[in-house]
Image (cartoon, helix red, strand yellow):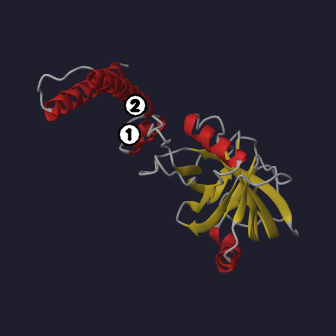
Amino acid sequence: MKKLTLVCEAKVSLSPELNEAENPSGAIEACVTTWGAREGADGRRFNYQPEGFAAWAKEFADTGKPLPMFLNHNDLGMPVGEWTSFEFDDDGMIAEGRLYLSTGGGADLYQILKESPMMFGGVSVGAYADEACWVDGEGNEVDEPDEESYFQIKQGGLREVSVVMYPNNPDAEITKLEMFDAAGQLNIRMVERTLREAGLSRKDATTASLVFKRAVDQREAVEKQLDSTPTQGEPDAVENALLEALTARELAKALEKRIHKGIAK
């Protein structure tokens, strides 16, 4: 096969980048594809291996030219950002880049990803194959591919990586996106992600993140009221400690309730 172009999509999942509230740069990081045999949501079957992209990755690093970032593979339009580095780990290919916040398309996409990360659900690579083959589930080449075979790039690379609406590979994620706006507002979904990474179940993490958001909202309301109300000499440290204790108590109660409910099932 020569210069076969294909698409592989991945799920978006966001986490906060600190100290970006006042001067966001649009930095973004993603696992753009995973290694090994997999079947996508649309039934396509791939077995990508790092060896197939090694030569391209080295050439990309040597040239220093960024890879375009498009929206939904609209390569006839202007890019919304760029990818500047690609590295391999045991699980897949990791890319770093940035959204063009000074452009309408980049700024709009940045805002959507912050406010609703599930709206544009993933990243998608536009890959090409100079040399490719079909393999079985163990990675052995097969002469006659069937419905159980996987497509594998033996030598190829990426033409672009897009942000897309519908993911196909849930194991590849955007792992970092600045999530603080100019007002310092944090996307609460990142709290949920952090709790899940710490070992909580999806349900418990969701419950805890909602409690946290409610506690933060209440704290902001109290602080706003205190700003407009004459103080009577209470130390700020006591006020903060009480608010933090209330937040911790609410969080603990919600988690305990969720855990007990799960055990009772």
Instruction: Name the image quarter holding residue 34.
Output: bottom right
Q: Position of residue 217 (x, y in %)?
A: 37, 25
Q: Mark 1 and mark 2 in contact (Cβ < 8 Å)?
A: yes
Q: Is residue 110 left or right of residue 19?
A: right
Q: Residue at x 62, y 38 (%)?
A: 112
Q: Residue at x 41, y 40 (%)?
A: 196
Residue situated in front as seen by the camera: 128 or 39 = 128
User: Total number of numbered labels?
Assistant: 2
Whether residue 209 can be seen here: yes
Residue situated in front as seen by the camera: 39 or 125 = 125
Q: Position of residue 43 (x, y in %)?
A: 75, 43
Between discs 2 and 1, the one toward the N terminus:
1
Residue situated in front as seen by the camera: 172 or 233 = 233
In this view, 131 is above or below 70: below
In this view, 231 is above or below 68: above
In three-dimensional space, the C-alpha distance between marks 2 and 1, rounded to whole angstroms, equals 8 Å
In this view, 33 is above or below 239: below
Label 2 sits on residue: 209
Q: Amino acid at mark 2?
A: Ser
In the rendered structure, find residue 195 and report the number of the disc placed on it: 1
Q: Residues within 10 Å of mark 1 (few under 14, many from 20)?
A: some
Q: Is residue 250 left or right of residue 242?
A: right
Residue situated in front as seen by the camera: 50 or 22 = 22
Q: Secondary structure at mark 2?
A: helix
Whether residue 169 can be seen here: no
Q: Quadrant of the C terminus?
A: top left
Q: Is residue 215 left or right of residue 45?
A: left
Q: Amino acid at mark 1?
A: Leu
Q: Residue at x 64, y 40 (%)?
A: 121
Q: Quadrant of the N terminus?
A: bottom right
